[in-house]
Amino acid sequence: MKRVVLIGSGNVATSLAHGLASRCELAQVYSRRLSHARALAEAVGCPAATDDLGALVPDADAYIIAVSDDAIAQVVSAVADNGALWLHTSGSTPIDVFCGHRQRCGVLWPMQSFSREVVTPLDDVYFFAEGNDEAALHDVTELGQMLSRHVTAADSDQRRWLHLASVFSCNFANHLWALADELLSARGLPFEALLPLIRTTVDKLDRLTPAQSQTGPAARGDRRIIDSHLAMLDGEKRDIYRLLTESIIKRNPQDKNAQ
């Protein structure tokens, strides 16, 4: 896995390009927009950029498809098999997207939240690898280990569950922070005041399970505070507060605290 082509220039592709460029030969970057392909290629010292799938260099060891889930099948069907290793980086798209199109294929999914504007270091990101046979899995894993210390085999079904869990732990959590920001900004209060609390909550997970680290009025069974909070809310935020509170209470952490 010495010579790699990267297909994509978005959120995931940006951090992958920076990681790959320092560990192997990144031969080419593709994007539907040539300006995006050129910008990313120049940022990492890659010598070639293209917006034409028919102009991909033919002699790379691996072709990494890092595009939106809906576009993966289009890329696969648009380019003929050249015998190299082809893989995508999606958590929810099964390996079957390559079925009938590639002899050697796999998946290398980094379970992380990426943004094009921020390059994420990959050394400690958990990557989940899959191959259509043992040889392909070996090569996908080897490629992953060039980028990260944490590479684990996971088939398409396992990856779907991991992706679902990541939505709960990342996307939903971030949405709750956005709702908290709305509550505070409407009253002239800074969201930044919550950052030490958020960081402490996350840091505790190095030592405790999420259930063990749960705090707050629902964990204590403090109905007086819960009712007070509900009276302050209306509409969607009230519904979300009630749903999450009931979910916490169902797990009955107050019994644990009483032991």
Image (spheres, rainbow, N blue to C red):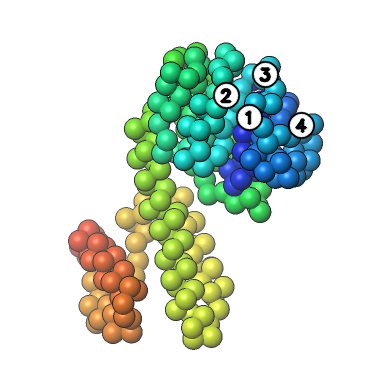
Q: Secondary structure at mark 4?
A: loop
Name the one closer to the observer, 25 or 218: 25
Q: Are marks 4 and 3 in contact (CB under 8 Å)?
A: no
Q: Earlier in the sequence, mark 4 or mark 2?
A: 4
In the picture of the structure, the residue carrying the numbered disc 3 is 58
In the picture of the structure, the residue carrying the numbered disc 4 is 48
In the picture of the structure, the residue carrying the numbered disc 2 is 79
Could you give the CA–CA distance between mark 3 and mark 2, rounded to whole angstroms?
Answer: 10 Å
Name the one closer to the observer, 202 or 180: 180
Q: Is residue 141 left or right of residue 218?
A: right
Q: Are marks 4 and 2 in contact (CB under 8 Å)?
A: no
Question: For mark 3, does the 10 Å Cα neighbourhood hold few (<14), some (14 to 19), or many (20 or more) residues?
Answer: few
Q: Earlier in the sequence, mark 4 or mark 3?
A: 4
Q: Amino acid at mark 4?
A: Ala
In the image, residue 185 sits, relative to residue 155, either above or below, namely below
Point 57% across, 49% down: residue: 114
Q: Amino acid at mark 3?
A: Pro
Could you give the CA–CA distance between mark 4 and mark 2, rounded to whole angstroms?
Answer: 18 Å
Q: Amino acid at mark 1?
A: Leu
Q: Amino acid at mark 2?
A: Val
